[in-house]
Amino acid sequence: MNDTSGGRRILFIVGASVVAISGILGVFIGENGGQVAAEISLFGLLSLPTTPLAFSLYGMVLSAALLGVLFGLVEYASRVENAR
């Protein structure tokens, strides 16, 4: 039995769940934030309209990118450990 396939499957399910929850929370935040301001500036680089779709997509993309980096670091650490 291959132990890595089970671990990867679990990480994929956790990652997909986090991205989905980020999208759902983005809808709620965008819906309520639209009443306060028409748009916000992100890090002075990007202007994001406060709509449910924009916040949902932003949350999903950001969480997917961060999880991708973290899972990549876990994969790298695992390979380094197995090489010893």
Image: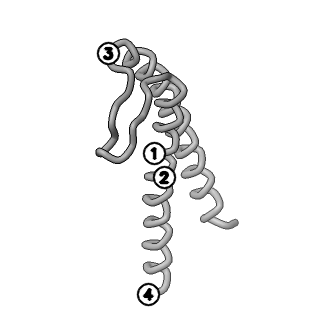
Q: Are marks 4 and 1 in contact (CB under 8 Å)?
A: no
Is 2 left, or right, of 68 in this rendering?
right
**Label 1 vs label 2: CA separation?**
5 Å
Q: Nearer the viewer, residue 13 or 25?
A: 25
**Type of residue at label 2?**
Ala
Among numbered discs 1 and 3, the one appearing first in the sequence: 3
Among numbered discs 3 and 4, the one appearing first in the sequence: 3
**Label 1 vs label 3: CA separation?**
23 Å
Q: Are marks 1 and 2 in contact (CB under 8 Å)?
A: yes
**Type of residue at label 1?**
Leu
Q: Give the image location of residue 17, x and y in percent.
A: 55, 37
Among numbered discs 4 and 1, the one appearing first in the sequence: 1
Q: Nearer the viewer, mark 4 or mark 1?
A: 1
Where is 4 relative to 54, above or below? below
Q: Secondary structure at mark 4?
A: loop
**Label 3 vs label 2: CA separation?**
28 Å
The quadrant of the rendering that contains the C terminus is bottom left
Q: Nearer the viewer, residue 40 or 60?
A: 40
Q: Residue at x 37, y 19 (%)?
A: 33
Q: Are marks 4 and 2 in contact (CB under 8 Å)?
A: no
Q: Secondary structure at mark 3?
A: loop
- What's the mark number on residue 36? 3
Q: Give the image location of residue 12, x and y in percent.
A: 59, 50
Q: Residue at x 45, y 45 (%)?
A: 62
**Label 3 vs label 4: CA separation?**
55 Å
Q: Which residue is mark 1?
A: 62
**Type of residue at label 3?**
Val
Q: Which residue is mark 2?
A: 65
Q: Give the image location of residue 41, x and y in percent.
A: 33, 37
